[in-house]
Amino acid sequence: NGIATNHIVNVWAVGRDKECWDDPFSFNPERFLGSNIDYKGQHFELIPFGAGRNMCAGLPLGHRMLHLVLGSLIHQFDWELENPIKPNSIDMSERMGVTVGKLEALKAVPTKSVASKQDLSQNI
Ligand code: HEM
């Protein structure tokens, strides 16, 4: 009838629903080992790219780039937290908005890794 409506799905809440997830507030990527749940819009408990006909058009690119960029950063650099922050003292408070981010930015300090220097010397 020509009337357009906008809907905003609360993906944050879906991802923390204890009906869908065991221990939903824990960061536990291992929960996906041996699970058939994927992120491609067919399993509605996990929809980082949305679902249906308006889902993210960049999913294949995003999927490839994430692995490439993250893998390169981990391979090329050793990463440390800024003093005096320790892994278990990271402030994980969230900043609410249309998207959710960390309230305090995570500062990670890179130094060139031994592995990447070895790669370089092999190329000479
Ligand atoms: C990890 C990276 C990304 C995430 C998590 C993401 C997530 C999303 C989400 C949640 C939507 C809305 C889907 C909906 O309304 O149901 C969307 C839409 C869209 N995204 Fe992404 N996106 C990512 C990367 C990209 C990239 C790299 C591109 C392009 C190069 C892209 C292009 C688009 C476009 C064009 C739409 C609108 C699709 C439409 O309305 O038909 N996205 N994305």
Image (spheres, rainbow, N blue to C red):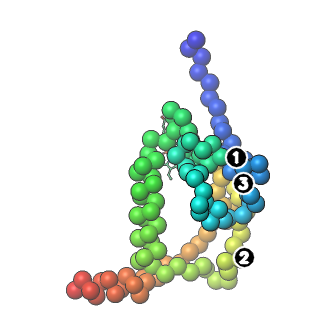
User: Which structural element holds mark 3?
Assistant: loop
Name the spot of residue 69 as percent of width and height, x first: 43, 64
Q: CA distance from mark 1 to mark 2?
A: 27 Å
Residue lying at 44% horizontally and 62% vertically, measured from the top left: 67
- Count of numbered tags: 3
Residue 14's label in the rendered image is 1
Mark 1 is surrounded, within 10 Å at the Cα level, by few (under 14), some (14 to 19) or many (20 or more) other residues, namely some
User: Which structural element holds mark 1?
Assistant: helix
Residue linked to disc 3: 21
Residue linked to disc 2: 89
Q: Amino acid at mark 2?
A: Ser
Name the spot of residue 60 as percent of width and height, x first: 42, 49
Q: Amino acid at mark 1?
A: Val
Q: Nearer the viewer, mark 1 or mark 3?
A: 3
Please report whichever mark, 1 or 3, sits nearer to the chain's N-terminal start: 1
User: Which structural element holds mark 2?
Assistant: helix
Mark 2 is surrounded, within 10 Å at the Cα level, by few (under 14), some (14 to 19) or many (20 or more) other residues, namely few
Residue lying furthest left in this view?
Answer: 124
Q: Considering the image in quadrants, where does the N terminus appear?
A: top right
Front-lying residue, 17 or 116:
17
Residue lying at 68% horizontally and 80% vertically, measured from the top left: 86
Name the spot of residue 79 as percent of width and height, x first: 52, 79
Name the spot of residue 57 as percent of width and height, x first: 45, 41
Identify the image quadrant of residue 22: bottom right
Front-lying residue, 19 or 96:
19
Q: Is mark 1 within 8 Å of ligand 1?
A: no
